Image (cartoon, rainbow, N blue to C red):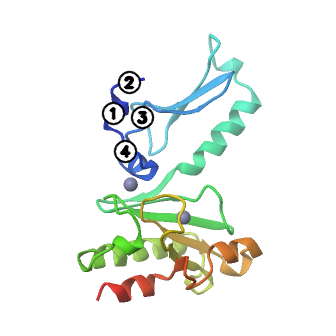
């Protein structure tokens, strides 16, 4: 364990945003170990090494390639001073992204009137990502978990598209204006 461990948050989303996981072991099994490059060549740059000493890349197997592809699902799609966007690891349709504030906010209920610009910005960024991927805003579902129903305790806006392709289970998990999943409009209305 390194001293970096101490500065890290318990919140995985905060760590993604703050790039504090550069030395974190992302994946480890009996054969390989995966971690982020300390000097990334792009937003996402990981190193996959075999635990056993192997001289060069010739030794990499198809299994390692699949692993790398899987880990690329946490690639940062967009970021600015305030927000950050990445793909949901369990997509509910063809396109499923999470837009989060860089500052740690527990959930939608914890938002105050001072955060109004922030949530407006989050929705705007999410819509830009849809447009960038030629997806319609009209066939997309947007929403926030409402406590106590949430997986990660860091505010995140779900954007799922096309909405029409969502499966039955996903439609329940991300049910429009339910008491566990609320729309950006509802969140906005509480901040006025
Ligand atoms: Zn956080
Ligand atoms: Zn979520």
Disc nearer the start of the sequence (1/3): 1
**Residue 178: image location, x then y, percent:** 58, 83
Mark 2 crowd level (few <14, some 14–19, many ≥20, 10 Å Cα) = few
Disc nearer the start of the sequence (3/4): 4
The residue singled out by tag 2 in the image is 2
Work out whether 96 lies above or below 70.
below
At numbered mark 2, what does the secondary structure look like: helix, strand or loop?
A: loop
**Residue 105: image location, x then y, percent:** 35, 63
Residue at the image point whose x is 41% and y is 82% from the top = 187
Rounded to the nearest angstrom, the CA distance separating label 2 from label 4 is 14 Å
User: Residue at the front extreme?
Assistant: 148
The residue singled out by tag 3 in the image is 22
Tell which tag, 3 or 4, sits nearer the viewer: 4
Tell which tag, 2 or 3, sits nearer the viewer: 2
Image quadrant, ligand 2 = bottom right
Mark 3 crowd level (few <14, some 14–19, many ≥20, 10 Å Cα) = some
Rounded to the nearest angstrom, the CA distance separating label 1 from label 3 is 14 Å
At numbered mark 1, what does the secondary structure look like: helix, strand or loop?
A: helix
Work out whether 92 lies above or below 63.
below
Q: Nearer the viewer, residue 122 or 183?
A: 183
Residue 58 appears in which quarter of the rendering? top right
Work out whether 48 lies above or below 99.
above
Residue at the image point whose x is 67% and y is 67% from the top = 92
The residue singled out by tag 4 in the image is 9
The residue singled out by tag 1 in the image is 6
At numbered mark 3, what does the secondary structure look like: helix, strand or loop?
A: loop
Q: Quadrant of the N terminus?
A: top left
Mark 1 crowd level (few <14, some 14–19, many ≥20, 10 Å Cα) = few
Mark 1 and 3 residues: CB-CB less than 8 Å, in contact? no
The answer to whether 165 appears left or right of 98 in the picture is right
Q: Quadrant of the C terminus?
A: bottom left
């Amino acid at each position: 364990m390194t001293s970096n461990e101490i500065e890290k948050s318990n919140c995985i989303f905060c760590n993604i945003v703050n790039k504090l996981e550069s030395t974190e072991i992302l994946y480890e099994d009996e054969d390989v170990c995966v971690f982020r490059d300390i000097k990334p060549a792009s937003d996402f740059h990981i190193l996959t090494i075999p635990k056993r000493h192997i001289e060069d890349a010739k030794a990499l197997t198809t299994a390692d390639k699949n692993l790398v592809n899987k880990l690329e699902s946490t690639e940062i799609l967009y970021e600015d001073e305030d927000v950050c966007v990445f793909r949901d690891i369990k997509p509910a349709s063809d396109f499923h992204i999470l837009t989060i504030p860089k500052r740690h906010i527990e959930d939608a209920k914890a938002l105050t009137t001072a955060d109004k610009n922030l949530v407006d910005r989050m929705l705007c960024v999410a819509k830009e990502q849809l447009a960038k991927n030629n997806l319609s805003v009209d066939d997309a579902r947007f929403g926030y978990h409402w406590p106590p129903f949430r997986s990660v305790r860091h505010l995140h806006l779900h954007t799922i598209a096309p909405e029409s392709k969502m499966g039955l289970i996903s439609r329940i998990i991300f049910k429009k204006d339910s008491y566990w999943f609320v729309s950006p409009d509802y969140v906005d209305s509480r901040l006025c």
